[in-house]
């Protein structure tokens, strides 16, 4: 820890002004912001001396002005967005649906509620989980991944076996209780390699932590088949 006498000596020009009658002096130590940068944003009703090396600001003026400036300093002394960013784990489920009443296995427990909702809105004969992919990223960053989908027993869907996912996570906007994951962009492509046969979902969205959201669906084979893209996200250490 820096010796108190060294700190006092470094701030001596400002502390000398405290001897003038009718004024008060306040020394504020910063945790995050640069002292000079904060000083530039403080109003002109107080004298301010900043020292970046000591991460300190000395305020001098009448009691009310110094108190107001001190509150302003506290509001400005916050971490950068990059320091507030949280790690995010994203799970993307790709579900195939077909008008044909082909046999289907019971959906996995984690997507069973979604499949029930889809069946209530889209009267396809069968639904099947074609792929599950997990992506880890961080607020304010982008990520992408690609792979293969499971074949689906319909004429065209079975060939849409290549997928690519791109995501652009938004910056954290709220405080500690904000549990929203913001996507500036979420893009899902599936198609046949080396051909022009493909389907795509491209959107922006907000997802509450732990919530499963159907972010898009695409009709295939003249509407006889479809792909549904479901996203779930949570914060991780």
Image (spheres, grey):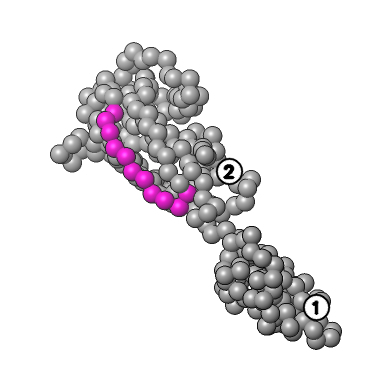
The residue at the point 48 percent across, 27 percent down is 114
- Residue 46: in sight, yes or no? no
Tag 1 near tag 2, CB within 8 Å: no
Q: Which is nearer the N-term, disc 1 or disc 2?
A: 1
The residue at the point 49 percent across, 55 percent down is 82
Q: Quadrant of residue 128?
A: top left
Q: Secondary structure at mark 1?
A: strand
The residue at the point 37 percent across, 32 percent down is 133
Instruction: Examine the rendered structure and indicate whether residue 132 appears above or below residue 167.
Output: above
Judge depth for marks 1 and 2 and give the one in front: 1
Instruction: Identify the image quadrant of the N terminus.
Output: bottom right
Does 54 appear in magenta?
no
Q: Which residue is mark 1?
A: 24
User: Which region shows up in magenta?
Assistant: 139-149
Q: Quadrant of residue 23?
A: bottom right
The residue at the point 33 percent across, 16 percent down is 101
Instruction: Examine the rendered structure and indicate whether residue 92 appears above or below residue 102.
Output: below
Taking depth in this image into account, of 23 and 80 the one nearest to the observer is 23
* Relative to 138, 67 lies left or right: right
* Relative to 181, 56 lies left or right: right
Instruction: Examine the rendered structure and indicate whether residue 167 appears above or below residue 73.
Output: above
């Amino acid at each position: 820890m820096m010796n108190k006498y060294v700190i006092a000596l470094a701030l001596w020009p400002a502390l000398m002004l405290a001897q003038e009658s009718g004024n008060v002096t306040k020394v504020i130590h910063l945790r995050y912001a640069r002292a000079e940068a904060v000083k530039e944003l403080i109003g002109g009703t107080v004298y301010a001396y900043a020292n970046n090396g000591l991460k300190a600001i000395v305020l001098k003026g009448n009691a009310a002005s110094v108190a107001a400036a001190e509150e302003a300093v506290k509001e400005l002394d916050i971490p950068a967005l990059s320091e507030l960013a949280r790690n995010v784990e994203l799970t993307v489920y790709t579900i195939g649906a077909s008008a044909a009443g082909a046999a289907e296995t019971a959906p996995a427990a984690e997507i069973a509620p979604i499949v029930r909702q889809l069946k209530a809105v889209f009267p396809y004969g069968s639904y099947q989980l074609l792929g599950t992919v997990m992506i880890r990223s961080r607020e304010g960053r982008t990520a992408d991944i690609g792979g293969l989908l499971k074949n689906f027993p319909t004429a065209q869907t079975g060939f849409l076996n290549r997928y690519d996912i791109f995501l652009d996570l938004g910056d954290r906007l709220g405080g500690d209780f904000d549990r929203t994951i913001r996507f500036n962009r979420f893009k899902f492509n599936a198609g046949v390699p080396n051909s022009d046969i493909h389907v795509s979902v491209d959107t922006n969205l907000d997802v509450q932590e732990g919530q499963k959201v159907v972010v898009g669906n695409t009709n295939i084979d003249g509407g006889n088949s479809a792909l549904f893209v479901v996203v779930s996200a949570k914060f991780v250490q």
